[in-house]
């Protein structure tokens, strides 16, 4: 027995040891496999802090966990986090994990996920991150996944989901989500048992909140038939707050956009309290103590086909009869609540929709409030029959309903409004439409702990009148409105007419607003603060039809506005932006800024200018146009951009930055900025007396004649910076002219100079230069040197070259001391660069009687390939140099080449290797041939490489444009076959064609453009 126990104990210890050791032994292998699978499957940026492996979490399965997981989108979603989670666990078969092949995943578990699902106005979804099966954009292995789903169970714990579909006007938010499901996902037909709990579910569609922070519980078994793509359910366990529901039905997928459904639901109980729980303000305050009477019933169905062309039939009914409710510790009850509401559509045709609130009634303190609403035929006649009549003393509400502690509510609301008849805008003949009445608010007051500055002294009367029996002849008039937010008064008027056609409006607004009160209406990030005062006196008039058409010149505005003592602080602006004064005036044509001044990070700025299309920019995100004049006394861009000019030692080629990506030029700006600055500091360079113009348009910044004094000379910039084609890798096209700059300061100031002119590190003196280039910047706003191409010329006014390894090696080889330190003056040369190479065209240097013609290439990787044709008087050659020359002559003679050595020796020198480790090969001209011819051939090869690269660009452009045009033609053809007319797509297709023509034209012009005549100071060849 003891032996048995001993063996058993040892066996358990071994198994326990293996359980600890296996995850450690195979962690590296599994981590590499996880990264491989992520890169193979997703286009998004995926990150995690660690991979945890355990045999205990889901024993006997092995658990592979990703800790602190984040998934960030790309393209337009590059700054949006799709998923973040405390952990993502998968359970898998142990043997398959060890083999790292056909890993069978049986469970997925997500802890504390935060999911942001977004859809743009154009319909692009941020969760579309799976690589297409034919994706060849990268060299990533696209073979079949090593992970095989044999899923039996999944679970989400403490989740948060936010969904916002801008294209469909729909949003949802789920907080405190706990959900799990189990079933045999390997089968085509199986039952999925699910359990769901959520602390708060909100849903909004078309601006209407249908659910608001509703506590939700659902237990349901779903019948899954993957072969037929149909899903059935039948459950009695649905709870929304206190409201219990039963539901049954089916849902089928016909194709990507067509669905079949047959769903029925109802409340098993007729207790009014269950329906009352759906009102958030009542449910969250002692709801369990509320006493209710009366009956309520909710039931409905949805049946038929849902597609872009068709809606299903539906019928939803809510009835409340003789209901009341009262808090036991409040003196009064809301009673005689009656409601009969039905929303239905008999066949799914949009014009057959009917919304009928046939009767509504409630009484508060014996004061009745009656209402009804009928709306049908929304596509054709748009028939309405609506009435609302009653009075409400808001100060009495706290005697019926519990509000948040510290809430104050007051004022009188009275309404007597009616509308009946066809509202169709095409009807102009006198008819049977009638509308009239009023809505009056007096002495409105509201404040709460989250709204400490009260809305008070609210007074307005909305008068509605109609003449002629036509809905479009209805007038709405607010003759005099007044409201105060805290101590800030606002007076306003508004008149509306022709509401069914053009919607004329004419109004005024005058008053002030304390900016600190914005936080009562908008949620700021922690650490954000806004103070200051806004004052305005404006008048506006126009039509909604003009706004819809973009005819903003027909919107008339006039008046003045000012901002005073504004200060804004936030996480990204910890020092705060201060704006003591902004004064603006409005006219029908534009908004003019007469005075604008402020400060930020020690910089004081001022400005003036004019802004056009302010209405289009505010309402429809159209381009904001204008001209601004901005002046700054001094600016330290290292502080502005989160960088430090002292972080790197002299000679560093990079600047540390906290930037999360390139600066994206807004698409909706068309501004000209005339700028000047006394001093701007960037990295380690001071730029003084800066002047110039920046034009922001079409996602591009154009630099025009930006001039500055810097580096002991002057600099003039021109060019463009654009994020239109690529948000991740902005395009640049720059040219600059420098005069009298110090070479050493220039070299260490610009990493581009370090790459293009590495000799500058060993050259002291003054330089003039003209240079133009095109290419891309990478994500940290530094040049992608492999993409740069351009040309330029340099004039070395005066200077000295010392300790330049290639020349020092030549001097040592020939034993010429005069070459070890060279004084230079008026040296001119020209360069071209592309594909990571710099071509230096031949130029002449004379050191005493030594004449050198130098040319060749060097790489941005510091490799060199130079040829020097030298005329060297033998008097400068040392003993070693003369021996070298004599040896070369002897070698030539042995080859049958007769060389006559004179007092001046013609040498050809070839330099290779790298700048720091050069190689030297010398030979006599008679043996090596013509060095100039070698240089010409080198230039021809360089030009051919540029042409080949440009041809490839044309091919890539043609392929991209062809694919885009083909896809849009398919969409357009499909729309026409289905009878749709989508002008947006048609315009998009036309824009694509125009853009294609533009791209190809620019590329071919670059190929075929003749070289310009050399500048006066360029080197003659």
Image (cartoon, grey):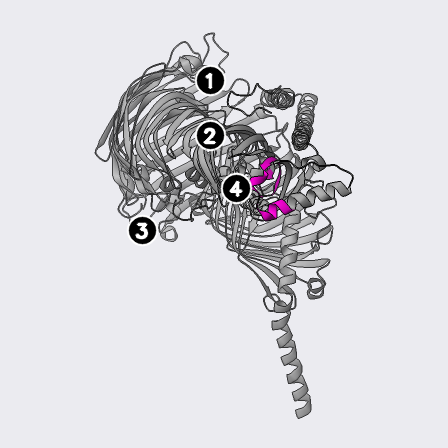
Disc 1 and disc 4 in contact, CB within 8 angstroms: no
Q: In the rendered structure, which disc, 2 or 4, sits on the residue that comes first in sequence? A: 2
Q: In the rendered structure, which disc, 4 or 3, sits on the residue that comes first in sequence? A: 3
The CA distance from mark 1 to mark 4 is 71 Å
Q: Position of residue 923 (x, y in %)?
A: 67, 40
Q: Which residue is mark 4?
A: 819
Q: Residue furthest right?
A: 896
In the image, the segment drawn in magenta is 858-883
Q: In the rendered structure, which disc, 1 or 2, sits on the residue that comes first in sequence? A: 1
Q: In the rendered structure, which disc, 3 or 2, sits on the residue that comes first in sequence? A: 3
Disc 2 and disc 4 in contact, CB within 8 angstroms: no
Q: Which residue is mark 2?
A: 666
Q: Which residue is mark 3?
A: 328
Q: Viewer-nearest of labels 1 and 3?
A: 1
**Which residue is pictured at 50% across the width and 23% down the height?**
1017
Quadrant of image for the C terminus: top right
Element assignment for label 2: loop
Residue 865 magenta-drawn? Answer: yes
């Amino acid at each position: 027995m003891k032996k048995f126990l001993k063996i058993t104990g040892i066996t358990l210890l071994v198994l326990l040891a293996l359980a600890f050791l296996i995850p450690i032994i195979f962690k590296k292998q599994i981590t590499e496999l996880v990264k491989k699978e992520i890169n193979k499957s997703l286009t998004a940026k995926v990150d995690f802090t660690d991979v945890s492996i355990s045999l205990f979490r889901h024993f006997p399965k092995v658990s592979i966990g990703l800790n602190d997981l984040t998934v960030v989108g790309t393209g337009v979603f590059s700054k949006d986090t799709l998923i973040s989670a405390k952990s993502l666990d998968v359970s898998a078969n142990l043997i398959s994990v060890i083999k790292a092949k056909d890993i069978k995943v049986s469970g997925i578990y997500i802890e504390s996920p935060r999911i942001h699902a977004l859809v743009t106005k154009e319909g692009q979804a941020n969760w579309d991150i799976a690589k297409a099966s034919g994706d060849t954009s990268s060299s990533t292995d696209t073979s079949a996944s090593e992970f095989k789903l044999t899923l039996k169970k999944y679970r989400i714990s403490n989740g948060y989901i936010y969904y916002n579909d801008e294209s469909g006007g729909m949003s949802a938010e789920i907080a405190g989500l706990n959900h799990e499901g189990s079933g045999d996902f390997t089968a085509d037909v199986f039952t999925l048992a699910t359990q769901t709990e959520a602390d708060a579910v909100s849903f909004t569609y078309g601006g209407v909140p249908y659910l608001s922070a509703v506590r939700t519980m659902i237990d349901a078994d779903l019948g899954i038939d993957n072969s037929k793509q149909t899903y059935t359910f039948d459950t009695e366990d649905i709870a929304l707050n206190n409201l219990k529901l039963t539901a049954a039905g089916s849902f089928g997928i016909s194709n990507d956009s067509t669905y079949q459904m047959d769903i029925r639901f109802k409340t098993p109980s007729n207790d009014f309290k269950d329906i009352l729980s759906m009102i958030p303000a009542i449910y969250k305050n002692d709801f369990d103590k509320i006493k209710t009477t009366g009956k309520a019933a909710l039931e409905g169905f949805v049946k038929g086909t849902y597609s872009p062309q068709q809606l299903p039939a539906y019928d939803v009914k809510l009835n409340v009869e003789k209901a009341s409710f009262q808090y036991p510790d409040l003196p009064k009850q809301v009673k005689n609540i009656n409601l009969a509401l039905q929303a239905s559509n008999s066949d799914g045709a949009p014009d057959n929709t009917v919304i009928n609130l046939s009767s509504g009634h409630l009484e508060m303190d014996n004061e009745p409030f009656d209402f009804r609403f009928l709306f049908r035929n929304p596509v054709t006649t748009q028939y309405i029959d609506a009435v609302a009549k009653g009075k409400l003393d808001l100060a009495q509400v706290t005697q019926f309903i519990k509000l948040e502690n510290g809430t104050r509510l007051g004022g009188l609301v009275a309404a007597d409004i009616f509308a009946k008849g066809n509202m169709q805008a095409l009807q102009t003949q006198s008819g049977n439409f009638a509308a009239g009445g009023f809505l009056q608010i007096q002495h409105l007051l509201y404040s709460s702990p989250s709204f400490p500055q009260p809305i008070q002294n609210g007074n307005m009367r909305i008068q509605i009148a109609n003449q002629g029996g036509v809905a479009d002849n209805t007038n709405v008039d607010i003759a005099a409105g007044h409201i105060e937010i805290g101590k800030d008064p606002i007076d306003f008027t508004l008149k509306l007419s022709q509401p069914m056609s053009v919607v004329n409006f004419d109004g005024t607004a005058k008053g002030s607003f304390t900016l600190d009160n914005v936080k009562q209406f908008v949620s700021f990030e922690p650490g954000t603060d806004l103070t200051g005062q806004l004052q305005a006196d404006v008048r506006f008039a126009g039509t909604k039809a003009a706004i819809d058409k973009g005819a903003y010149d027909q919107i008339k505005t006039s008046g003045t506005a000012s901002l005073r003592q504004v200060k804004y602080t936030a996480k990204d602006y910890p020092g705060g932006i201060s704006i003591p004064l902004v004064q603006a005036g409005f006219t029908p044509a534009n908004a003019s800024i007469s005075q604008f001044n402020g400060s930020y990070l020690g910089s004081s700025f001022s400005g003036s200018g004019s802004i056009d299309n302010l209405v289009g920019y505010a309402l429809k995100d159209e381009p904001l146009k204008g001209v601004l004049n901005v002046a700054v006394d001094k600016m330290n861009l290292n502080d502005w951009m989160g960088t430090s000019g002292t972080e790197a030692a002299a000679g560093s080629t990079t600047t540390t930055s906290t930037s999360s990506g390139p600066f994206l030029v807004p698409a909706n700006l068309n501004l000209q900025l005339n700028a000047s600055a006394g001093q701007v500091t960037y990295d380690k360079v001071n730029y003084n007396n800066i002047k110039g113009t920046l034009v922001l348009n079409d996602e591009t910044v154009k630099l025009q004649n930006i001039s500055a004094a810097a580096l002991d000379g002057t600099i003039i910039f021109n060019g463009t910076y654009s994020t239109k084609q690529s948000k991740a890798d902005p395009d640049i096209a720059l040219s600059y002219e420098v005069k009298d700059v110090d070479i050493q300061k220039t070299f260490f100031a610009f990493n581009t100079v370090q790459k293009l002119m590495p000799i500058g590190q060993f050259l002291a003196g003054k330089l003039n230069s003209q240079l133009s280039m095109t290419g891309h910047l990478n994500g940290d706003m530094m040049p992608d040197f492999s993409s740069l191409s351009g040309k330029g010329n340099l004039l070395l006014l005066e200077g000295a070259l010392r300790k330049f390894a290639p020349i020092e090696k030549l001097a040592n080889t020939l034993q010429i001391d005069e070459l070890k330190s060279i004084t230079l003056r008026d040296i001119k040369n020209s360069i071209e660069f592309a594909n990571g190479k710099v071509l230096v065209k031949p130029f002449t240097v004379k050191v005493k009687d030594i004449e050198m013609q130098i040319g060749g290439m060097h790489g941005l990787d510091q490799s060199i390939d130079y040829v020097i044709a030298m005329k060297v008087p033998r008097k400068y050659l040392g003993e070693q140099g003369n021996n070298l020359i004599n040896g070369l002559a002897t070698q030539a003679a042995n080859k049958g080449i007769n060389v006559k050595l004179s007092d001046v020796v013609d040498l050809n020198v070839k330099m290779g290797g790298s700048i720091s480790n050069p190689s030297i090969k010398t030979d006599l001209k008679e043996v090596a041939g013509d060095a100039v011819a070698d240089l010409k051939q080198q230039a021809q090869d360089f030009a051919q490489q540029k042409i080949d690269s440009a041809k490839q660009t044309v091919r890539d452009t043609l392929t991209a444009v062809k694919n885009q045009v083909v896809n849009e033609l398919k969409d357009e053809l499909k729309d026409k076959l289905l009878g749709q007319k989508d002008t947006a797509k048609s315009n998009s297709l036309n824009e694509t064609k125009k853009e294609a023509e533009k791209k190809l034209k620019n590329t071919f012009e670059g190929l075929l453009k003749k070289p310009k005549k050399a500048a006066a100071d360029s080197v003659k060849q």
